[in-house]
Amino acid sequence: MKLKQVLFIASVACILHTNFAKESITYLYSHSLATTKEAAYSYAKENKNKIIKNKKYIIDGKIKTFDYPDATRRFWRLTMFFTSLGQKNEIAALKAAYDETLQENHNEEVIPIGRCRGASVIAGMLGAHNPEQIAAAILESPFDDITKVFEKHWFIKAVEKYTYLSKENIYKLFTFFSSHNANEKKPIDYVKLINKDIPLMIVCKKGDNSVPFSCTKRIYDTLIRQGKKKTHLLMLDKGIHGSLLWTSEGTKYQDCIHAFYRHYKLPHNKEFALRGQEAFEQTFSDAVQAYLEANSA
């Protein structure tokens, strides 16, 4: 076989491999507190049995789901003893699910998608383990440090009001009855270690009363200061924590994510991506900074 033929075949094989890698995507869902792995299908085009189709979706393809150690299907919804809120045992659970995905198909690229606790664990896993086959990540309402959430969370305020316990004592009780360790790293400690080449989309509501905007913005600011230029921030004015995709600005959320996918050459819905391009352009750091400065008063 002539050298030119060998080079031509090698080039074609390289192109085919690249295209295949981009198309061979598994969406790894990281669930929030007091939910289970089944929550993944509320973000998907079709439910697990492919019977029900969702009108809004940001997942269209293979899904890898798993339960965190604290997940339960009993009425109390949470086994708090195993809850660490973004620390070692939860990071280990997500890493194990990622490893299982690659064992099933070693050429796979993975897009982790998570909400609240699940999003914070993704940040932790990306920073702690630097996994190589990450195509992108979607973080909805991540928190930087649970102690910061305790300062403003509506539930903590209610407990403080009716029990006369201080936030500090409520936090101490939480650490006593859970796996959270006040001396261990928090999600924000891992953020600066995330690979700068991973495209990240952070989604939040500016007036969130569960995870304050300031907690999510500290993650974003840390990433930007570290020179991670593929970091994006979508700020929504309306919506309910944990249900941003299905409330009033859900279509904007959906379309912006598909525009994000298209920008980084990932599978996407073309109609959604075109519709979401304007919103996506506002997620780049310069546009975010200009918006925040204009609305800082």
Image (cartoon, rainbow, N blue to C red):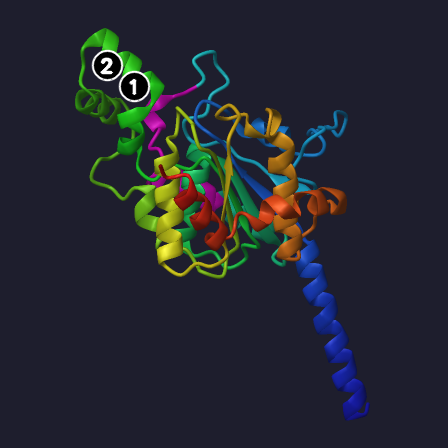
The answer to whether residue 235 is left or right of residue 143 is right
Residue 27's place in the image compared with 210, above or below, is below
Q: Main secondary structure of the magenta part?
A: helix
**Considering the numbered disc 2 on the image, is that residue within a helix, a strand or a loop?**
helix
Residue ID for mark 2: 160
Pointers 2 and 1 in contact (C-beta within 8 Å): yes
Residue 114: where, in percent of width, then height? 50, 37
The picture places residue 26, in percent across and down from the top left corner, at 63, 47
For badge 1, the amino acid type reads Ile
Total numbered labels placed on residues in the image: 2
Disc 2 residue type (three-letter): Glu
The crowding category of the residue bearing disc 2, from other C-alpha atoms within 10 Å (few below 14, some 14 to 19, many at least 20), is some
Give the residue at x 43% y 13%.
Answer: 76
Residue 39 is left or right of residue 21, and the answer is left
Give residue 219's position: percent from left, percent from top.
37, 45
In magenta segment, residue 217: no
Q: Residue at x 58, y 50 (%)?
A: 281
- Whole-number angstrom distance, CA of label 2 to CA of label 1: 6 Å
Task: Specify the segment rendered in magenta.
Answer: 78-96
The residue beneath circle 1 is 156
Question: In this view of the protein, which residue sits in the foreground, 50 or 200?
Answer: 200
- Pick the residue in front: 67 or 109: 109
